[in-house]
Image (cartoon, rainbow, N blue to C red):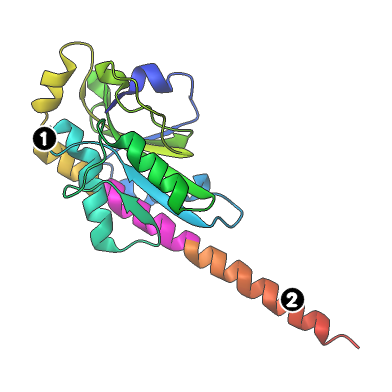
Amino acid sequence: MNLRDKFFQKKPAAYRIHHEDDLAIETLSERISLLLPTRRTDSIVIVCIGTDRSTGDALGPLVGSKLKQLQPKATVYGTLESPVHAVNLNEVMASIEQTHTRPFIIGIDACLGRLHSVGIITAGEGPVKPGAGVKKELPEVGDIHLTGIVNVSGFMEYFVLQNTRLNLVMKMADVMAVSLHQSIEAYGTDISSEKNNALNWGDDLLQLP
């Protein structure tokens, strides 16, 4: 969990949309697609940070579990069964570095923010900073980030997270997981199309007199 207002106030270009917006999935998917690398990457890795022991902080693991069910063309770390949290985050990031060659990492996390921002999903460049909202020093995660503001910041953050409505978190996780899946599926198709076009172009050259 990170504190959005502290970490993202210098990133005004980050895209924000409420999870109940009628076009939330469509527009969020398009935004994520714009954030994905234009050149081929060896692997897309999604790190969903949080714990199922706290309702508010379960957003990340819920997104991870829902993504796993959708079987995306990406590697997912952090589910309800195997969460990525403060205790094992360093170990997981070291494992990713050893396992994947030039991974493009998407960091997923829950946030606390202002009252009028609760329910908003944010997508943008740069990493998330897990633990900032509860005064923990943890490594930053991600080439891009996707976060959900689940409750209000400013006072007794642990208590606030514990008392966040599960209904809200589940709905936000649904939007985030489907948006991620759609953007990654489209990204894979685009890469394949580019590869086929390149092959066809090469064939045309061979046919020149």
Residue at image coords 12%, 32%:
54
Residue marked by disc 2:
201
Q: Nearer the viewer, residue 74 or 186?
A: 74
In this rendering, position of residue 77 left or right of residue 186: left
Residue 90 quadrant: top left
Q: Amino acid at mark 2?
A: Trp
Looking at the picture, how far across and down is residue 74, in whole percent?
Answer: 40, 58
**Front tag of 2 and 1:** 1
Mark earlier in primary sequence (2, 1): 1
Q: Are marks 2 and 1 in contact (CB under 8 Å)?
A: no
| Helix, strand or loop for disc 2 | helix
Quarter of the image that includes the C terminus: bottom right
- Can residue 129 be seen? yes
Residue marked by disc 1:
53
Tell me, for residue 38, which label it has, or none.
none
Residue at image coords 28%, 55%:
67
Magenta residue check for 160: no
Magenta range:
175-187
Structural crowding at the residue carrying mark 1, measured as other residues with C-alpha within 10 Å and reported as few (<14), some (14–19) or many (≥20): few
